[in-house]
Structures are given as structure tokens and as C-alpha cells.
Amino acid sequence: MRTLKHEKWIERLSKIDFAYQPIVNIHTGNAFGFEALLRFHKEAGFSSIDDVFDQAYTHEMLHPVDLFLREKAFAKFAKFKGQSHIKLFYNLDNRLFDTNDYSPGNTAQMLGEYGYSLDDICFEISEKHQLACNKHVSKILDVYRSQGYKIAVDDCGTGFSGMQLLYYTEPDYIKIDRFFIQNLENDPKKRLVVSTIVNLAHFMGSLVLAEGVETLDEYLLCKEIGCDMVQGYFVQKPQLDLNQLKKRYMKIGHITQNERRNGVVKDQSLISNQITHATPVYSDCSIISIFEKFRNEDKISFFPVINQHDEPVGIIRETAFKEYIFSKFGRQLLENPSFGKDISRFVKKIPISDVHSSVENLIETYSHFNNNEGLIMVENMKYIGILSTNSLLKIINEKNLTLARNQNPLTKLPGNTMIHEYFSKTLADFSATYHLIYFDFDNFKPFNDRYGFRNGDRMILMFADMLKKTGFSENRFVGHVGGDDFFLGVKHSENKDILLEMEKLARQFKKNAESFYDRETVEQGFMVARDREDKIRQIPLMTVSIAVLELPGGVDRTCSIEAAGNMIARLKKEAKQSETGICNSTMGMPYPQNQTAPFEVISSILVK
């Protein structure tokens, strides 16, 4: 191994090996890269992984030790990588840049020996240690980037350097630390932090990688928030054996396929139809060729820039060349050897988004950046085109029209189509507990007949407002099936809490409903009217029946939408016959043998 002469260090480091953990596209499961993780530090006589580099730094051996380990990691991974383009993420100790013997150019030499291209490598810079001079590090990383290497900020949000490191490094990738991912579904503060980092990263033109994802729920929330890649035990643990590594992790792809089948992913065609394939230029082309393109194509204001693997690097704007294009000696200035041939000085980053992203995430990204060019769109991290500002506005307009079509015209709540989509999503998501709650007014028809449809509509709007006040959030869905039938879906709640909330809601509705009757009827507690069989009798004042079906988390729900609808229909019938007006059951628990009910309203609606 190069440059390391110290025999004791060579002996110790020879006992160290590397394991590799996949970093995959959050939408497809395709392996974008693998992180090299040091193993067997104790066998080499170190108390921890950090101790390897702390001792090297103390003994002024950090640079040669790093190069030794770097080559070891590259050489082993090359056996798996072969000729394919899969990135290797390698951790750099940022104290390396402050050592007296640091020298650039060593990596390029070893990459050539093992069959890598420069953009096959991503250096991870950690926030663990305070940088002595951020500007100095920034210059070194600029050199790395101009040569084609990628830069990632590791453990984002946990170290000393914080926002300064992001500001000076302008990384290609930002890795969110496991601390913020763990228990994400139950911690609103963590969700706020993660979404803030995602928005900041996309504003800077960086892609986001969620580290340490261990559960399906964490994965789904990272995807919902807008992370681009994922790494963790949920995909695969670090592997010493290269034969255990894969170039595609089907589990992730299957989740996305199930979401598409169930109607959860519904924006992709809307987005794809608006993407324009603006012809890109390559990052290794000459400055003069770019100069000539702008001179010859006067209607083009920018070109997307990609590397040899079709990964976006940024854009080059015409304004960057303006002074040269209109200068008499502009071409001669650019051809001057002292100016250099590297186009990286002209490349500017703009946000990058995946074609599988939701419209909401695209709008969030664009609204923070608000540039003139729009968004660079990728699929499997490869450039496919530009989503312009005008195209994004068209998508928003179409989305709003679709939303309006799927709303109930009276209450403006989501209608049957969106309720169907929610049902499909909950039945497919085994990782979380859901409660599917169906509401049906009791004695609504006699009220409507006596007091008129206008007052009937007012009663419906009153209940819709009550449901809205329960809170719209990522864990709650409120829908209006039609007439006096409503739906509420709740994620991540205890059954006892839901039942207490429903009891309170039922009492409040009964009290509010009394205000719609005349005083005499309220005082006697009933109204005299014809029932559904056209017989005159005493009709009780209006109440609401509530059917609650719990879908427990961690249970494989081999249940169709029709079957779930039938369960709720049975529960609704039982609720109408009960004293409380509420009936609750858990999917998987048997119903009493003497309780049967026809396939009722919600089931027939959801099948449509």
C-alpha cells in the first residue's frame, strides 16, 4: 500500500476489513452506491473506529493511514463493482485537510489502477470535528469537485460545523443522521427537522439521503417528506461478503409497485407529460464548445450539464458567457491557456427532483428556490429533462382541477375516489396502526322531510365542520361519502383514545343537532313523523352512529377493500342498535355468529 512505511501501523491496519452498505433510490430500490464501513478495529488494537483516526492524528500519521485504508476499500469494492457505474461512498476525516503532509492527486492514481472513474467516488465529510478553516477546506473540495468527485456531508445536524459546513462545501448529497430518522413517525419535532433539511438541501441543489432507516414506517415517512435516497437495516445491513450485495433491492421496488396498484402514487404521469428534454452538455466538454453553442442558438438561455453517466451536475446560463459572447475578443480570452479549460466555474446548481416525487414535494422544492429555469428532473438519478416554471404551473392547475372533481360539492371534503385511495393505502401499509371510522346520522330523513333540504344541508355542514376541527394532518384523513355519511381515517393512535374521542364527538353532535329543531320538539324529546315504512310514530331526535374498525400495525392484512367495507357495514348496523351509538372492532377478531348484515353503502361505494 502506498506511502505508509511504518511497519507497526501496517501490521495493525492489515487486520482491518471493510463492510459495504447499500444506498438506494428511495423510489425504485436501485443501488446508487455503497458506503465503505471499517470493521475489525478491536482485532487491530483500537477501542473504536474513531480511535483508529484519533491515534493516527495524534501520531501525525493521519494522511498515510487514510491513504492505506482508502486503497484497501477501493481494491475490495472493485471486485463487486466491475465495469458498472455504482458509487463508492468513502468517509474522510476532515482533520486530514489540516495536516502538514496532506497532498492532492493520490486518489486519481489509485482509481486508475482499480478501474474506477473519478465520478464513481463520493467523499463523505463528517461534522464530528471542527474545521480549522472552512474556506481552506472549501477550496480543496472545489478541486475534488472540478475533477469529477462527488461530495457528501455526513451526520447532518449532529456535529460542530453545522450550517457552515453545508455553506462552504455545497455538497452533492446531504446525509441526515440516524438520530432524526429514529421514531420519526411519533415525533413531530423530528419530522419538522427532517423536512427542513430536505427543503434546504433541495434549495442548494443537493440530494438527500436518510441514514439508519430500520422500519417500513421510517422509510415511508422519509419518502413522503421528500428524501431522495435511503440507507439502513431496512434495506440491508453492512456486508463483509461482497456476494451478499445487490445492484437492486426488490423490496423497495415492490413497495412502490404496490402503491401504484393501490392508487397511492398518482402524480407521475401528470409530471412526466410536462417534462421537456432540454439537450444537455457534458461536464468534460470544452469552454469554447459551450461558447459556440450560445452564439449559434440564440433562443436558448441555459444548458443542463451532466457527467458521463448522465447524472446532473447543474446548469450553465447564457448570462455567465454574456461578456465574452458580445466582446470583440471574447473567444480569444476563453482560448487563452491561463483561463483554463474547466467549465466548472460556469456551472450553477439548481434543484434536482425525481420523476416519482409528489406534486406537493415539487412545489415545495421550487417555491424555496424560485429560479427561472425550473427543476432538473431525474429517474434513477439520471437526467431526463427540465420541468419549467410554466410546466409546474400547469401541473398545479391540473392537480387543483382533479382535487375539485374529487371533492364533495357541499362540504368540499374529499369524496369517494379519494376515500377509496385512502382505504387502499391503509390496507397495504402493515407498519402502522390505522382506525377506519364511518359516521351515519340517525333519523336524518324525517328531519329533512319536516325542516327542508336547506336545513338538512346545514346539519351536514355542521358535522363536516366538527370533523374538520378534529384536525387535518399527515395522520388524519376526513372524507364525505355523500348525504349524511362521513369517513375519518386516523394513523398512529391508541384504540382507547379513539373511542374516547368518538364518544365526545357523538355527545357534541347530539347537543348541536338540537338547535336545528323547534323548541317544542326539543322539550318533548321526539318529533311525530312518518318512518321509512310510512308509519306515523315518535321519531327520536337526531344522533350519529359511529363504526370504528381498528387495523393493528405489524399484521399482514390479507383483506380486500370489499371485505373491509363489509366489516364496517356490520359494525354500523351494530352501532345503530347499541345504546352508545358506537361499535368498535379489530380486524382479525371474529364477529358474533348471530350478527350478520348485507353488503351496505360503503362497500358498494369503495368497489366503484
Image (tube, rainbow, N blue to C red):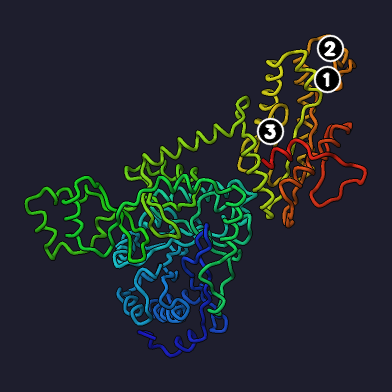
Residue in the image at 67% along x and 48% along y: 426
Left or right of residue 280: residue 566: right
Rendered image quadrant of residue 393:
top left
Visible in this render: residue 59? no
Residue at the spot of label 2: 521
- The kind of residue tagged 2 is Thr
Is disc 2 in contact with disc 1, using a CB cutoff of under 8 Å?
yes
Rendered image quadrant of residue 411:
top right
Visible in this render: residue 474? yes
Residue at the spot of label 3: 481
- Label 2 vs label 1: CA separation? 8 Å
Q: Which mark is residue 541?
A: 1
- The kind of residue tagged 1 is Leu
Left or right of residue 236: residue 603: right
Q: Choose the circle earlier in sequence order: 3 or 2.
A: 3
Query: Is 585 or 4 nearer to us in this picture?
Result: 585
